[in-house]
Image: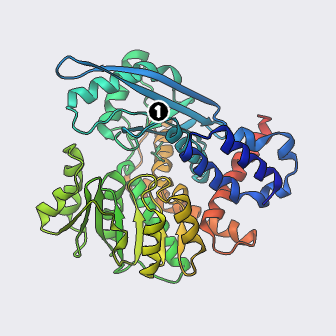
Amino acid sequence: MNSYVERVISELKEKNANEPEFIQAAEEVLSSISPIVDAHPEYEKAALLEKMVEPERTIEFRVPWVDDKGQTHVNRGYRVQFNGAIGPYKGGLRFAPSVNLSIMKFLGFEQTFKDSLTTLPMGGAKGGSDFDPNGKSDEEVKRFCQSFMLELYRHIGPSIDVPAGDLGVGGREIGYLFGMYRRICGNYENGVLTGKGRSYGGSRIRPEATGYGAVYYLQAVLKHENDSIEGKTVAVSGFGNVAWGVCKKLAEVGAKAVTLSGPDGYIYDPDGIATEEKINYMLVMRASGRNKVKDYADKFGVEFFPGQKPWGQKVDIIMPCATQNDVTLADAEKIAANGIKYYIEVANMPTTADALKFLMEKEGVIVAPSKAVNAGGVLVSGLEMSQNSERLSWSADEVNEKLQTIMTGIHDGSAKAAEEYGLGYDLVAGANLVAFQKVADAMMEQGI
Ligand code: 2IT
């Protein structure tokens, strides 16, 4: 490894010792980009890598809100504006009890490189709160969103920073956030948020985009391997928006998701989560706020495995769609023992560092990295920004076609970059190399 890269990794670990998720994400990128740094000795003098692992700005704020009984609660809000070199900061908001500074920084860092891969002009950011929307009434969620925006509004704008949804933040929350932004600012800048409803400037295909994009990326991998998607079985984790889009697109192209998971365990449906009724039921389960995947087993009479993950199932393809660190080394060993060839990360950083290393070194396993596979969501957010700034609306076919073309391009560009650096078909290194180069060029040229 390049000695400058090595030094920055060791400083990163020292400086951010209590931020394990951030260290994991940053180390993964830094350890891929040595060949570029070797060719650019000027980076060290400009401290380019040290700048890249330090957010441009981190905002933390108090979010007080009143529950239905009149009791006031206080949560912590965040916005980490990680890197704005290639466009306005862009990235989702996550509402979940697990949210902390390390998680926000890891997601903002990943977002910088993901947004670079989309080829659209977007910088990287992430935000959110440790507020848990599960089990809250609609009015409580509304009051929370309004209070959150009462602080966030001063840090965002259509050409400053454009938040969107992530875990716990969907169309309903984006609606409440935009309503409050519009009241505070007194203008109709709907390009300030993406993932909006269709009635006020949302893009077609945005709800489906992350899942659809992941399947388009998967199809490009299969094409590279002279394989086809027809009849393939897929283990999916999670049952939120991303898993929903994946199941829907898999069914459409003749494959089937056979598992879903939640905090309570996982379900196995050998017929596939492939009918309209089953796919729509995922939305019902999510909207119920119960956060239990067992509801699916009860409704459709399939097997439920309490407290377990689906990674021991023998399938053709693995697609973790839940959240970070969902697949551990023990899970990875099961996946390899089952002879599964395609390991397609979908959620942000779903694989622990040791599990990822194991799978990447395993002969016959192809690993596709989340920052490339799940880029379809923010990509269509970028298209939503374009439509808003031009005050027009593209058809579903137009958006879908752009999504498919760019996702295929992300795969092909990553494969080509890895080849060029003599790394073979390494999609993880390839994505990091392509994403890093664009951000590095912009930062060096701007002298920042
Ligand atoms: O992780 C992600 O890329 C997102 N949550 C979507 C971000 C966006 O701005 O659409």
Query: In the image, is residue 328 above or below residue 40?
Result: below
Classify mark 1 as within 8 Å of ligand 1 or not, answering yes or no: no
Place of residue 66 in the rendered image (x, y in percent of width and height, measured from the top left): 26, 19
Which residue occupies 21% across, 56% down?
A: 280
In this picture, is 390 found above or below 286? above
Q: Which of 65 and 257 lies nearest the eye of the viewer?
A: 65
Q: Is residue 428 visible?
A: yes
Q: In which quarter of the view is residue 273 placed?
A: bottom left
Residue 186 visible to an observer of this rendering:
no
Nearer the observer, 262 or 181: 262
Q: Residue 289: image x %, image y %?
A: 22, 43
From the viewer's side, name the closer residue of 56 and 444.
56
Q: Position of residue 22 (x, y in %)?
A: 57, 44
**Color theme of the render:** rainbow
Hey, which quadrant is residue 353 in on the image? Answer: bottom right
Q: On the image, which quarter does residue 274 sit in?
A: bottom left
Considering depth in this image, is 217 or 64 the residue closer to the camera?
A: 64
Mark 1 neighbour density, 10 Å: few (under 14) some (14–19) many (20 or more): many
Helix, strand or loop at label 1? It is helix
- Say which quadrant the N terminus sits in: bottom right
Q: 106 above or below 369?
A: above
How far across and how far down the image is residue 335, in percent?
A: 43, 74
Residue drawn at (55%, 63%) of the image: 354
Identify the residue position indicated by label 1 in the image.
Answer: 191
Residue at coordinates 45% horizontally, 82% vertically from top-left?
339
**Relative to 276, is 162 on the left or the right?**
right
